[in-house]
Structure formats: C-alpha cells, structure tokens
C-alpha cells in the first residue's frame, strides 16, 4: 500500500530530492544611488530531479572575491524548474553602495579582472511549506569586469 507523506497539510518532496545547480549568467547595475546599488542578475538553474520542482522563499547571497557583497531574491515569489530541465531566473540583488565600492577596490587591487571568482549561495523551500533546500555555487564571471569599470567611474 502506497502512502503519501504529509507534514502540516503539505505533501513532502520525493525522497532524494536534490538542490538545483546554479550559475550566474549575467549581472548589470539596474539602479544606483547614494545608499545602495541594485543589481539585476540572471541565474541559470538546472533541475537534476525527475520531477518538476517549485521553489518558494528563495534567497540568494552573492560573494565576490571572497567577500559577501549582495543579497536578494528572484523577481517572482515562486520559481518553477522543469524536471531534468533548465530555467533562467531573474534576480534582484541589493548591496550598500559604500560597502560595494570599498570592498571591490580593496579586494581587487592588482587583480586580473578577466575572470572574477564569485560564490552564489542561498536557500529555498520546496513548495509553499516544504522542505528547506540549500544551494552553493562557485565560479568565475567575466562580466564582473564591466561592473568594476562602471563602479570606478
């Protein structure tokens, strides 16, 4: 006899559900003022699971050059990832202006900006009340050179 696991009125995700893999696809300055810089990012998310995954309460943190710089969330409150498929997720990241400029200037002295290391980490919930998933991705991002040039002006 098959039983569906239920917690708090919400079905639990399938056993062995794996977190999506992420890659920062692009990053641009959407707004800037004296207090903060809003970054518009696209995150490519791959779902390795044999079922569609709907995520809620998605939160991102972006570290650049080993320093925490920005935090944010997708533009939509729920993110749907097709089974064994990919989706591009638009994300809004916010960082205090002073912190971003000072950190990048200090951490970037003498650095080759052709490939800037980043770490994208965060969390989400499977469904509205489901199990928490954590994700963490490290990589390099060539477009950071353009952001760095924009900030130095």
Image (cartoon, rainbow, N blue to C red):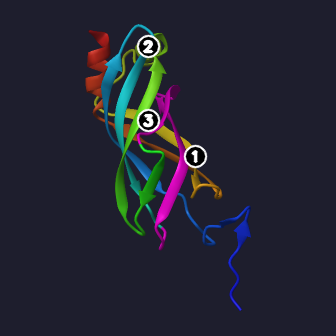
Q: Is residue 93 above or below residue 134?
A: above
**Range covered by the magenta-colored residues:** 49-75
Circle 2 residues within 10 Å: few <14, some 14–19, many ≥20? some
Identify the residue at image location x=64%, y=58%.
130
Residue that badge 1 annotates? 123
Residue that badge 3 annotates? 118
* Spatial separation of the CA atoms under disc 3 and disc 1: 17 Å
| Secondary element type, mark 1 | strand
Q: Is residue 79 above or below residue 109?
A: below
Identify the residue at image location x=45%, y=10%.
35
Identify the residue at image location x=36%, y=22%.
111
Circle 3 residues within 10 Å: few <14, some 14–19, many ≥20? many
**Which tag, 3 or 1, sits closer to the chain's start?**
3
Q: Residue 139 falls in which quadrant of the image?
A: top left
The quadrant of the rendering that contains the C terminus is top left
Circle 1 residues within 10 Å: few <14, some 14–19, many ≥20? some
21 sits to left or right of 116: right
Q: Nearer the viewer, mark 3 or mark 2?
A: 2
Residue that badge 2 annotates? 97
The quadrant of the rendering that contains the N terminus is bottom right
């Amino acid at each position: 006899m098959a039983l569906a696991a239920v917690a708090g009125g919400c079905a639990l995700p399938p056993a062995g559900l794996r977190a999506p893999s992420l890659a920062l696809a692009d990053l641009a300055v959407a707004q800037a003022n004296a207090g903060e810089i809003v970054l518009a990012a696209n995150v490519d998310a791959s779902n390795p699971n044999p079922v569609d995954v709907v995520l809620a309460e998605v939160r991102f943190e972006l570290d650049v050059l080993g320093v925490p710089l920005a935090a944010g969330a997708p533009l939509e409150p729920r993110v749907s990832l097709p089974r064994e498929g990919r989706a591009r997720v638009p994300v809004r990241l916010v960082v205090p202006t002073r912190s971003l400029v000072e950190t990048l200037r200090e951490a970037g002295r003498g650095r080759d900006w052709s490939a800037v290391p980043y770490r994208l980490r965060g969390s989400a919930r499977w469904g509205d009340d489901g199990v928490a998933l954590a994700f963490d991705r490290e990589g390099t991002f060539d477009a950071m050179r353009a952001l760095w040039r924009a900030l130095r002006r």
